[in-house]
Amino acid sequence: MSDALVLGAGVVGMTSAYALARKGFKVTVVDAAAGPAEAGASFGNGAQLSYFYTDAMASPSLVANLPRYMLGLDPAFRISITPSPAFVAWGIRFLANATQQAFERNTIDILQLAIESRPAIAELSGKVKFDYGKTGKITLYSNKEGLEKAKALTKLKNQFGADQAALTRDQALEREPALNGYGHDFVGAVWSPYDEAGDSSRFCRNLRELLERDYDVDFRFCLKIRRIITRANSLVGVETETEQLQCSSLVICLGAWTPVIAKTAGIRLPIWPVQGYSLTIPALPSAPIASITDTARKTVFCRIGNQLRVAGLADIGNNMGVFNEERFRSLLATAKGMFPKAGDYNGEVNPWTGLRPVTPNSKPIVGSTKIKGVFLNCGHGSLGWTLSMATANKVADEISLSTHA
């Protein structure tokens, strides 16, 4: 019997396995894919470690733009209403979190998790190679209203440990000369000097080697999970397509698929998938060194080694991650218009789409459940890579306390 079974081998599951193994647990990781970070958001995410850009999705500005998003007038953000009761319930809770007070509270709560995660990821960078870069990040704003709101939020976040600075347009150009070749105008920016970057897929693959070598962690790939087996509100094990796995503790880290599996144990979770896209191309000499986030176009550019990762789009509705060629072409056209000389768009373009597991308040769900022995580490939205070590340590601490109680 394994001391701890981790469902999911994305970045959240892999860091959970690492945190548990370091506490002395015998850990087994189960995933339906053929290897770590092959099926979900960890494979092709934006690559940014956004420790200080932790803005919650639900906000007054998003509500103000809802008609545009619902009518398909914004190429970067689309919302299609679905009659699903789960979607309606999620949407109501999402809107309740869109007040200015809730937005600020949620943003600061996520910020504090990100600050906890940063030193732990830096420590792991000495053990696991993943094109780790201390690049900093520049967030661009296309109008004065958006910039002034960002300045106010920056001032608030800096009171809670962030270290951001507002930049004029000229200061941003001085900070990142590649912006001289930017295809759109902007009025100013926010500089996050301690934000970082890395390849989360490579991180997961190399972390697997470390876990197998140093901690004897067992990996079970190509094993599809059917349900969680419980008896009298206590964990019994997990049923897969081919066998039943026994365990004393279980951590569900299945990203957007977590609600489906958790429901088999009677656990209902307010998580809805938000589909995004990315492309990876060879970086050219004129590519930016710092990570770039364009708030107007909801697109990020990030160097990972000699590659350039471009990620963006947010589609909310009744989807389960089916690749939409038209949406990908929209991202590709946007990228070419923003940084036409940053990457080799005519060379090998590696497309990706995936689902970000978003909660109404954008905060991850971490900890115990009503079922004894079943724990959650899920709902990270677009910040799973950033928050992974903080939430992994939290769930491992809770499991350790419950085991020794």
Image: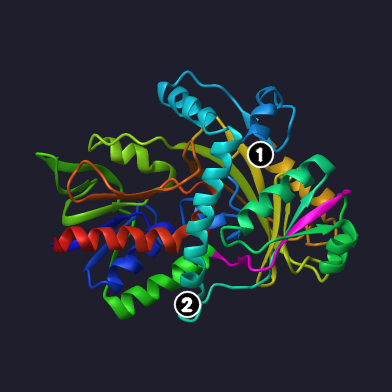
What colour scheme has been applied to the protein in the rendered image? rainbow
Residue 1 picture quarter:
bottom left
Location of mark 1 (residue): 325
- Say which amino acid is labelled 1: Glu
Q: Could you tell me which secondary element the residue under label 1 belongs to?
A: helix
Residue 279: in magenta span: no
Q: Residue furthest front?
A: 159
Q: Nearer the viewer, mark 1 or mark 2?
A: 2
Mark 1 residue crowding within 10 angstroms, few (<14) / some (14–19) / many (20+) = few
Give the percent coordinates (x, y) of residue 254. 38, 49
Give the percent coordinates (x, y) of residue 119. 50, 72
Residue 195: in magenta span: yes
- Up/down of 362 relative to 35, above or below: above
Query: In the figure, is residue 26 to the left or right of 60?
Result: left
Please provide the residue range marked out in magenta.
184-199
| Residue 194 numbered tag | none
Location of mark 2 (residue): 123
